[in-house]
Amino acid sequence: MKNYSTYQSVPGTGRLYDPFGNLLQPVRETATEKSMSCDVVFGSPSNDCRGTGICKITARKGNTPVDGARRECKHAKALLISGEHGRSLSMVFARELLCVHIWKTHLRHGVLVLQEPCKIPLDIARTIGLKFYTLQPGQYKVEELDGRYRIRFGE
């Protein structure tokens, strides 16, 4: 597994450079927040990503091509933002990038329901400084503001 903490930033780009050739999507860092662009696949991990919830999260590397999951409207691009010194995670989606099916199935009533845990990949958690590696089952409020949806998760 790669150790992202050894990577250097590319000056003026807000990106981390991997000496092995991968250029990660923008990673933003402030004193208390770090963020990273990711793909979020909706569905249930134990049901082959069908149903409700969040099935998996993957880092976006370079210009990730549209794959079958996107055509089937199972995933969306999100910005993952760690806060409270790694004790919270906000997942932000642009409304115009969400397909109607995701909105109707997962976000419509202002609540995202996770019926089972979803693992946060270790490389993502380390890159944005999270102190936890799993989204726990529960009901999470979906906040809408200025064409974006935000879902907050805690440790």
Image (cartoon, helix red, strand yellow):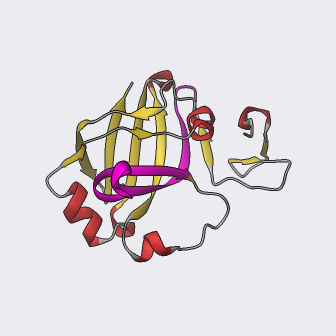
Rendered view: 7 above or below 10: above
Which stretch appears magenta? 31-58
Magenta span dominant secondary structure:
strand
Residue furthest to the left? 109
Q: In percent of the image, x 57 and y 26: which residue is there? A: 31
Residue furthest to the bottom? 71
Residue 140, image x, y percentages? 24, 39
Q: Nearer the viewer, residue 6 or 35?
A: 6
Task: Check if residue 94 falls in the magenta segment.
Answer: no
Q: In percent of the image, x 74 and y 49: which residue is there? A: 12
Q: Quadrant of the C terminus?
A: top left
Residue 33, image x, y percentages? 52, 32
Q: Nearer the viewer, residue 55 or 19?
A: 55
Left or right: where 87 falls relative to 115: right
Rendered view: 12 above or below 105: above
| Quadrant assignment, res 87 | top left
Q: Quadrant of the N terminus?
A: top right
Rendered view: 60 above or below 29: below
Q: In percent of the image, x 29 and y 64: which residue is there? A: 102
Left or right: where 9 falls relative to 111: right
Residue 29, image x, y percentages? 60, 36
